[in-house]
């Protein structure tokens, strides 16, 4: 079993994305991925797609070195969204995307 890095917080999100919306959704997700990777406290981040199986065909995983780093990142990303007039909830609704999002720590 891999050792748990003390203090890490994981944001794991799963998305059910309709096939016709996948290109637009992934384009935005990769923009977010690049922005997150540059933020202090981000240890790793991944965007993954599932080829078959469950209804959730896209997943993201971001590991933060602390809850404080996660909170600071959320604030910074929210500011960027506000500056560009981007509403992630509206974006997903327009594309017909359903999400299952959560915060996790090592067990």
Image (cartoon, rainbow, N blue to C red):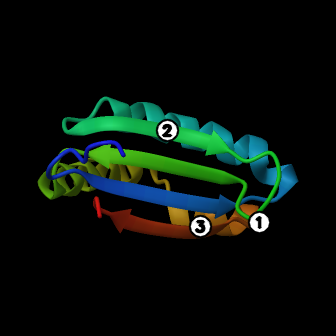
Residue at the location (66% across, 51% down)? 58
Local secondary structure at mark 3: helix
Local secondary structure at mark 2: strand
Q: Position of residue 39 (x, y in %)?
A: 26, 35
Snapshot quadrant of residue 12: bottom left
Marks 3 and 1: in contact by CB < 8 Å?
no
Give left or right: position of 83 versus 56.
left
Observer-side mark, 1 or 3, equals 1
Alpha-carbon span between mark 2 and mark 3: 23 Å
Residue corresponding to mark 1: 55
Give neighbour class at mark 2: few <14, some 14-19, many 20+ (Cα, 10 Å).
few
Q: Visible in this render: residue 40?
A: yes
Give left or right: position of 32 versus 49.
left
Q: Residue furthest right?
A: 20
Residue at the location (64% across, 37% down)? 27
Q: Is residue 26 above or below residue 85?
A: above
Q: Position of residue 66 (x, y in %)?
A: 16, 51
Q: How many marks?
A: 3
**First along the sequence among labels 1 and 3:** 1
Residue corresponding to mark 2: 46
Alpha-carbon span between mark 1 and mark 3: 21 Å
Residue corresponding to mark 3: 90
Q: Position of residue 79 (x, y in %)?
A: 29, 51
Viewer-closest of 60 and 4: 4
Viewer-closest of 53 and 20: 53
Residue at the location (46% across, 53% down)? 85
Viewer-closest of 32 and 3: 3
Locate the C terminus by quadrant: bottom left
Residue at the location (19% across, 35% down)? 40
Observer-side mark, 2 or 3, equals 2
């Amino acid at each position: 079993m891999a050792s748990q890095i003390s203090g890490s917080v994981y944001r794991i999100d799963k998305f059910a994305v309709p096939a016709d919306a996948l290109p637009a959704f992934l384009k935005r997700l990769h923009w977010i991925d690049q922005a997150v990777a540059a933020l202090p406290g981000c240890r790793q981040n991944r965007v993954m797609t599932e080829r078959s199986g469950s209804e959730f065909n896209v997943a993201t995983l971001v590991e933060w070195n602390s809850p404080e780093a996660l909170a600071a990142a959320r604030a910074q990303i929210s500011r960027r969204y506000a500056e560009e007039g981007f509403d992630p909830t509206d974006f997903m609704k327009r594309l017909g995307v359903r999400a299952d999002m959560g915060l996790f720590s090592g067990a």
